Amino acid sequence: MPVLNTVLRRRILLIYLTVCLLFYALATLASLDRADAWGERIATSLVAIGLLAALPRPTVGWRYRVALFCGCTAPPIALISHTELAAQVWALIPLILIAVFVRSWHRTRTARVIAAALGIGADVGLVIAPAEAPPLWLLMFPVCIMGIAEVIGLLHAALLDVAHRDPLTAVWNRAGLYRELADLLPRARRRKDPLAVIVLDIDDFKSVNDRDGHAAGDTVLTELTERWTTQVPDGALVTRLGGDEFVIVLTGYDESRARALAEALSGDGPIHVSNGVAVGAAYDPAAFAGLLAAADRDLYLAKGNKPRPPADEAPAL
């Protein structure tokens, strides 16, 4: 995941955990002489643990998972001990906030499963709690949690998606590539799939802009990326690194299959495209960077061996 995403996600999670810590701590202090405050005491301890896990930078890996788990489990536990219905209503707010957070930063399927789990947890808390909640609340709480998370979280997720795509071609930009790799690399490691990196570079692209104008160059880029996205398998990452350089990342391809795909992507049309390929077990960002550098070297070797077209055969649209 890009550093900017990690920082922003951590900041929002820290705000949520800090607010919850104050929320539950104040509720605990206000109920010191009451036996029904044990739910808030457990919730306070959980969010404090989550906060400690989230404080070190960057908040990734097991520390992020611990912080998220604590943030998700504290609100349903707080529901269990309440004797007053008003307290149950207030307890709904943290459940909605963490559901929105998860929907904003995680895959749709994962976020919906967690939101459903939060809704079920809320219902369990309402049923167990001494406060007798109206039966309609057992429907209202999950609907509020999942519905608000879907509406607001979907908006946040859409904004993040736009920020991670190239505005011209709509494929991933560099930041989007590394965000997607955060899911693709662990999945490839679990399956022991090789990782293939294909770098594509349009030959003499400057001549297209100089001869036909930048609008023509933009058309070349969009038409090529539209073709590439239909040629690559599902799950492959098509990325514009900048200018006329693109990279495609996919799993499960050995070198011979990756080179065959690279040649198919280069095509034989009037626009000449060079390609470079590298395949390996790059299961972490540092190893992936090395694989990308190897594909770049292969690209420039290919470009050095490729004869340049004569001046009267410059690329045409």
Image (cartoon, helix red, strand yellow):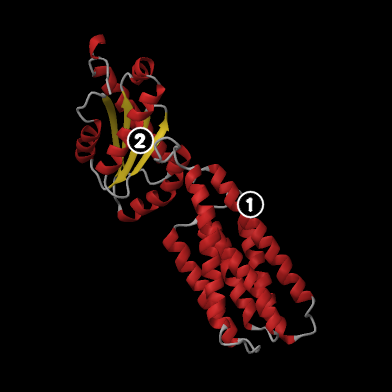
Q: Which residue is mark 1?
A: 11
**Mark 2, other Cα within 10 Å: few <14 / some 14–19 / many ≥20:** many
State the image quarter where residue 198 is shown. top left
Toward which corner of the image does residue 300 lie, by quadrant? top left
Mark 2 residue type: Val
Which of 234/80 is in front? 234
Relative placement, left or right, of 173 versus 36 is left
User: Residue 213, image x and y in percent?
Assistant: 39, 19
* Dots 1, 2 in contact, CB < 8 A: no
Horizontal placement of 238 versus 77: left or right?
Answer: left
Across and down, in percent, residue 184 comes to 38, 50
User: Residue placed farthest to the top in the image?
Assistant: 311
Three-letter amino acid code of the residue under disc 1: Arg
Badge 2 is on which residue? 247
Q: Position of residue 216 (x, y in %)?
A: 36, 24
From this viewpoint, is residue 121 visible? yes
At 59% from the left and 70% from the top, the residue drawn is 95
Q: Residue at x 23, y 14 (%)?
A: 313
Is 139 left, or right, of 173 in this rendering?
right
The x and y percentages for residue 183 are 41, 52
Label 1 secondary element: helix
Q: Which residue shows up at 77% across the image and 71% down it?
A: 26
Residue at x 53% of width, y 55% of height: 155
Between residue 253 and residue 122, name the one nearer to us: 122
Mark before the other along the chain sequence, 1 or 2: 1
Q: Quadrant of the C terminus?
A: top left
- Please tell me which residue lies in front, 237 or 302: 237
Task: Kindly report the distance in space between the C-alpha atoms of the residues bearing marks 1 and 2.
Answer: 31 Å
Q: Indicate whether 133 appears above or below 312.
A: below
Q: Secondary structure at mark 2?
A: strand
